[in-house]
Structures are given as C-alpha cells and as structure tokens.
C-alpha cells in the first residue's frame, strides 16, 4: 500500500517513520526521497497553515510509495481543528497581521468543517482543496 500525491488537511503533520524508505516530497518539479533517520520526526506543513499564513508557508506535496521489503509502520499525528458533529467548527482565515495592500488575502474566511467536507469528498487526487477557497 502507498498513497498518491497529496497535501495534508491540517495545520501541520508530525510523522515518525520506521526504517523503510517510501516517503517522497515534491520539490522543484521532482520527487525527493525522505530517508528515515532513527528517532527523527518529519513535520509537514498542511493546507490550513498555508491558508492562515496567506501562502507564506506552503503545504508539502508528498506521496508514499509501496515497498516490497516488508510492512511499513509509521506513527502520524495531524494537528487540525476538531470537526465533531454538533460542535461549533473553527473559522480559518488569513492572519490579519500578515496582510497588507501589497499582500492582500488570497483565501476567503472558511469554516473548518467546510474545508474538510471538500478535502474528504475529493479524495487524494493530487489537487489542493485550497483551490476551492481562493478569492
């Protein structure tokens, strides 16, 4: 099993890899292997951090290739707002201190629940859900 090209729908993601290769990030039009380092954590910037920083930080496009060596075991934590049914959802918008006439907002104010509805309904198709929320 692996995962296709995607970004994470979180502020950021923390990953503890096992010792098997397979994680790749897309940078400068090429896929780069993220080799495991014993005891190290991988931190990916997610879509919600990209939104609130008005593209100052960009989501990490990545994928995981299937490996024939053996089972992959990874521990991952997604840092995102809760979206439990019946609870109020967090409003996400560009941080006003990062905005100016030279740097106007790129994204509209959104409810996190609306973002995750788009994220989960479209699946991991390689396109960012943030495209739906651009001004």
Image: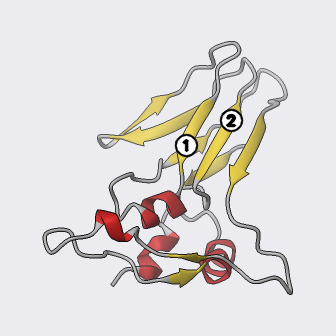
Residue 117: x %, y % from top left: 67, 81
Residue positioned 77% across, 74% down in the render? 83
Residue sticking out furthest to the front: 97
The vertical placement of 91 against 95, above or below, is: below
The circle drawn on residue 66 is none
Q: Nearer the viewer, residue 120 or 57?
A: 57
Residue 1 visible:
no
Residue appearing at x 64%, y 20% in the figure:
40
Residue 133: x percent and y percent? 44, 81
- In which quadrant of the rendered view does residue 17 lie? top right
Instruction: Determine the secondary structure under disc 2.
Output: strand
Q: Are marks 1 and 2 in contact (CB under 8 Å)?
A: yes
Pointer 2: residues within 10 angstroms few (<14), some, or many (20+)? Answer: some
Residue 79 in view in this figure: yes
Classify mark 1: helix, strand or loop. strand
- Of residues 119 and 72, the one drawn nearer to the viewer in this rendering: 119
Characterize the local packing of mark 1: few (<14), some (14-19) or many (20 or more) Cα atoms within 10 angstroms.
many
Q: Label for residue 15?
A: 2
* Left or right: residue 50 compared with residue 2: left
Residue marked by disc 1: 44
């Amino acid at each position: 099993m692996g995962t296709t090209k995607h970004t994470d729908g979180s502020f950021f993601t923390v990953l503890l890899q096992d010792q098997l290769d397979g994680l790749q990030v897309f940078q400068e039009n090429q896929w780069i292997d993220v080799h495991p380092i014993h005891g190290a954590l991988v931190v990916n910037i997610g879509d919600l951090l990209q939104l609130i920083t008005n593209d100052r930080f960009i989501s990490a496009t990545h994928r995981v290739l299937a490996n024939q060596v053996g089972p992959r075991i990874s521990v991952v934590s997604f840092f995102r707002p809760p979206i439990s049914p019946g609870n109020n959802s967090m409003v996400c918008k560009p941080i006003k201190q990062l905005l100016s006439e030279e740097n106007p907002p790129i994204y509209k104010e959104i409810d996190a629940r609306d973002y995750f509805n788009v994220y989960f309904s479209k699946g991991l198709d390689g396109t960012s859900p943030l495209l739906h929320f651009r001004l």
